[in-house]
Amino acid sequence: MSEYKDIEFKEVERKKKVRKKKNYLLRFCVFIGIFAAAALFLSSSFFDVKTIEVDGNGYYDAEEVRNLAVATTGNNIFWGGDVSTIEDNLLKDPYFEEVSVRRKLPSTLIIEVKERTQIAAIVYGEQYVVIDKDGLVLRKSKVDPKITLLTGLTISKLSAGEKVEAEEAATLKTTLTMLHAMQNGDVYFKRIDVSSIVLRAYIYDTLVVKGTAKQILSGLESGDLQKVINNLLKSDTTRGTIHLGEHNYMPFSPEFE
């Protein structure tokens, strides 16, 4: 009697194993079917890139960014366009500090950029070398870029995408910090001559501020220099010299030196 029970138990076990194998095969086929359908749907024209948006740009307009990125519509948003290639293309240009590309389903690519801000241009022969606040060379131009011009530097290296190297390295560094403070303090210098320790920062061709880079920086950060300049401009004074001394002492002379 016990022998029959054992045989009956073995038959039940074998039938269960067969059912399990059939279930696994069915599930696998269903999975493959769903995967194939999803891949087919994601490859459809519904997910073709129709719009490329640009965000964060300032110096370049949106069309210029798209051209520099070599970003085109018509490709599949998932695998038809190489996002990393778009980022690499833009990062070749020194103006772009950071770049990221993200997808907005179903058909939009968004290129987000962070640009370096041009703060001054070094007059170098017949060229204008545009730099940012860190002294990084952004571009070279034969046309006046209409930003503060720096003259009197002794340049030893001047390559796009790299920092300027000059004999007056300490003065240049402080001058760039000063220019950043100038922008925040609502003051504009047309030109700064850094050929000596005492800088000549021109508000107009005949109205100049004379002092070391640290003295001018201190005057800008305290706001005292802005007050002196504003008072002169209110009285239509466009000729003379503002002398900067210690402790923000700023006597004005109507003589242009």
Image: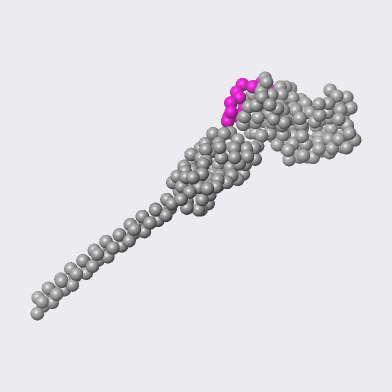
* 140 left or right, relative to 216: left
Q: Is residue 107 left or right of residue 177?
A: left
Residue at the extreme bottom: 1
Residue name at image x 62 percent, y 44 percent: 56
Q: Residue at x 69, y 24 (%)?
A: 123
Q: Is residue 85 left or right of residue 151?
A: left
Report the quarter where the N terminus lies: bottom left
**The quadrant where residue 145 appears:** top right
| Colouring used for the render | one colour
Classify residue 2 by image quadrant: bottom left
Residue 159 counted in the magenta span: yes
Q: Which residues are magenta?
A: 153-164
Describe residue 134's horizontal placement relative to residue 181 as left or right.
left
Residue 22 drawn at (x, y percent): 24, 64
Q: Looking at the image, which is closer to me, 243 or 53?
A: 53
- Residue under the point 86% across and 35% down: 233
Front residue of this view, candidates 219 and 186: 186
Please tell me whether the stretch drawn in magenta is mainly helix, strand or loop.
Answer: loop
The quarter of the picture where residue 13 lies is: bottom left
Q: Is residue 29 among the parts visible in the rendering?
A: yes
Is residue 185 highlighted in magenta? no
Residue occupying the point 61% across, 21% down: 156
Quadrant of image for the C terminus: top right
User: Of residues 224 and 91, which is closer to you in this image?
Assistant: 91
Please count the marks in the image: 0
| Residue closest to the eye, 112 or 163 | 112
Q: Position of residue 184 (x, y in %)?
A: 73, 40
Q: Is residue 97 visible?
A: no
